[in-house]
Amino acid sequence: MLRQEDFAVIKALQERGVYQKDIAEQLGVHPKTVSRALKRDGAPVRRRAKRGAKLAPFKFTVDRLLAEGVWNAVVIMRQIQAEGYTGKMTMLRLYIQPKRVLRQGRATVRFETPAGQQLQSDWGEVVVEIAGIATKVCFIVNELAYSRRFHFWCTDSSDAEHTYEGLVRSFEYFGGVTQEVLVDNQKAAVLVHPAQGEPHFNEGFLDLAGRYGFLPRACRPYRARTKGKDERMVGYLKQHFFVRYRSFTSWAHLNQQAEAWLAEEADQRLQSTVKEVVTVRFGREAPHLQALPTVRYDTSYHEIRQVGWDGYVDVRGNRYSVPGELAGRTVMVHIGLDDSLKVYQGETLVASHHLQVASQGWVSVPEHHYQLWQDTLRVESRPLLVYQEVVAWN
């Protein structure tokens, strides 16, 4: 269909004497389209039918089917098409959508997973006081779907490394690993989850799953009921733990208080759905958990660094020493979530430090640069006879 811009081109070319056939070829339309536009002296005007006009005679049928509990738009579409409806599905859906609030809630059959089958994971956020400062706290909640026993860990970020650390800490708290882990669609675990088809998991999350032997699973988009148990625990923590405890001296104090509260209160509660004390139910689930791996998963950040010629690497605004013989070479630094810093040359650990701010000065280990200092302080020695000859010549 011609636009106003197209007609302006037609008019300009026609006034310059260009044949209609050539104008049509230039615009990619039929010559008759150009001819009609010139006769009409403008682009065609789109005339839209009144919204819902085609559906109006069939609304009684649609309302009757809805009242009978038929809410499937495809089924309704077939019925009114049989009665002569020639409109599109979009019009029918737009008519049905506002009425869905009147639909009676469907009964939900609660699905209980077997012991040791599934752990559900989710993140929450809250603001509390840490060392006298209002601080945003990210907390990961990991709950065993069978026993309802859960563990949570508080930190300052919900990125991939902190997600993996939170899962590892929960496995260690439970003393074993479930057969599968169900997560929400956060990028730390799921890169893409199409409405239809299998999700594409984050490579790091797949690596963690392989090391700990669990099957990664993701909630279907827009299906909040899929992971309802764990999402309720996020609210439970906000309404219980973070109401009772609002200030902490440090992050370590916060997590120590969290584990004490879990043991004293959360693990001892009578779970309202299964009508059983959590620790009692967990006692039956624990034997079904898989064993923890012998080597703990490394959740630190991995970054490549170039060693300076003075034998230091730059990490987060400060400098840290490494053995002098690595000057000018490439190393891998592992930055732990506990602010530990480990430097590797290939598979060999060559230096260990603890991160500190630049105002505290560079972090050095004297042994790293012993040889560099020896090379710097070495002075060439000459026999005394050389100086005697110089004096004699003068």
Image (cartoon, rainbow, N blue to C red):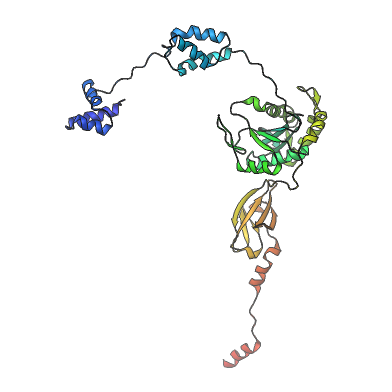
Residues 358 and 32: in front is 32
Residue 280 point in image, percent of width and height: 83, 29
| Picture residue at 74% right of the left edge, 48% below the top | 295
- In the rendered image, which quarter contains the C terminus? bottom right
Q: Residue at x 72, y 25 (%)?
A: 112
In the orientation shown, which residue stands out farthest toward the front? 82
110 or 361, nearer to the observer: 110
Could you tell whether 262 is left or right of 361 in the image? Answer: right
Residue 260 can be seen, yes or no: no
Quarter-of-image position of residue 386: bottom right
Q: Count of labels shown? A: 0
| Residue 8 percent across, percent down from the top left | 25, 29
Query: Which quarter of the rendering shows the N terminus?
Result: top left
The answer to whether residue 84 is above or below residue 392 is above
Which residue is farthest bottom?
392
Relative placement, left or right, of 245 versus 44 is: right
- Percent coordinates x, y for residue 391 in the rendering: 60, 90
Q: Farthest residue to the left: give it.
A: 17
Residue 260 x/y as whole percent: 80, 35
109 versus 328 height, above or below: above
Which quadrant of the figure has residue 33?
top left
Residue 258 can be seen, yes or no: yes
